[in-house]
Image: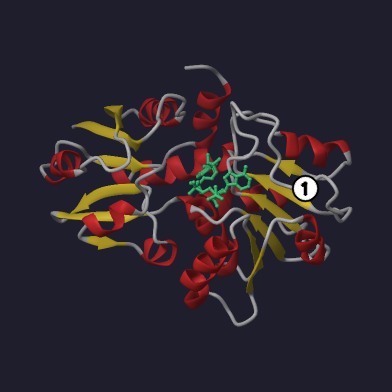
Amino acid sequence: MIYHFGLTGFPLGHSLSPCIHRAALRSTGLAGDYKLFPLQSGSSFEQLLLLMRQGDLHGLNVTIPHKQTVVSLVDLVSHTVRMTGAVNTLYLREDRLVGDNTDVAGFMTDLHEKIGSSIPRRKAIVLGAGGAARAVAIGLLSAGWQVVVSARKPLQAQVMRDQLRPWAREGYLETTGQEETEINSVIGECGLLVNATPAGMAPNLFDDPLPPAVELPEDLALYDLIYNPQETLLMRRFRQESRPAFNGLGMLVEQAALAFELWTGVPVSRADLWKAVDQPC
Ligand code: NAP
């Protein structure tokens, strides 16, 4: 069998997904390809979904701006999609188109690998209230963490809180703004800061989502979902003061590996995928 996989979203020019999935094919010895299907916001998915329903496309990744739109276009969604309201992986099972989300497990697996149980306080402040922030918050809440969502638009954070509330224990999900005083009022209780905004991502290398005068606890760890660049301004700020800081490459690799395994049923070596992102391909 020759597998046909792909990624849709916009823009896709700098995506590492083709590199990772081609490495997964090589590593598992399966024959196939991974193509990009750029589709701008408002474009129709019909053609792509038809390819999937016909069995001509065996797996599709979905990224910005379509992760939410696609939820209503599939026949079945996973529990993770019901919680996050976002799909990043599509496949066909018994003639039914299934929407899944591997970002949640991708983030939690990598977070666990990076920080283990060394975090002093299982309370996290998550910057941003978009699709990635939802995946992060659901992962943390499901693992028993307390979560504070911090967004520059208060209404956006409240909408996210209302959507996630059914999955959160009483008192485990709060919201705040992104002003210095608002963050200072909660950050002292947190053991982890997650940047789920694009602030600091190329080409906006000098953007920092955290106001400069925020008082960071000495042992606060940072997980920045950005992977381009591999060290953001925010990460540098943490490392300069000897705080642990990790980028989003591990999450990217893990969510891709999980999608590949859903599509093929074949386990893939993470080490082989890491080699693919470490070298230009
Ligand atoms: P999204 O749905 O567009 O949400 C972005 C969020 O960040 C929104 O709340 C937005 O608020 C906020 N934001 C944007 N610019 C900001 C700034 N300069 N300062 C403060 N807040 C800002 O995007 P997403 O899908 O959640 O992705 C967010 C980031 O995560 C991106 O960098 C993406 O590459 C990364 N990501 C990484 C992985 C991985 O595997 N490592 C997976 C998914 C996403 P406004 O509405 O106010 O702009």
Toward which corner of the image does residue 257 lie, by quadrant?
Answer: top left
Disc 1: which residue: 211
- Residue at left 85%, top 49%? 213
Q: Is residue 167 left or right of residue 200?
A: left
Toward which corner of the image does residue 240 lie, by quadrant?
Answer: top right
Mark 1 crowd level (few <14, some 14–19, many ≥20, 10 Å Cα): few
Residue 268 placement (x, y as % from top left): 43, 38
Q: Is residue 275 left or right of residue 4?
A: right
Q: Which type of secondary structure does the marked residue at label 1 adopt?
A: loop
The residue type indicated by label 1 comes to Pro
Q: Is residue 174 left or right of residue 19?
A: right
Q: Residue furthest bottom?
A: 170
Residue 110 placement (x, y as % from top left): 60, 47
Q: Is residue 89 left or right of residue 234?
A: left
Residue 55 placement (x, y as % from top left): 14, 41
- Residue at left 15%, top 39%? 47
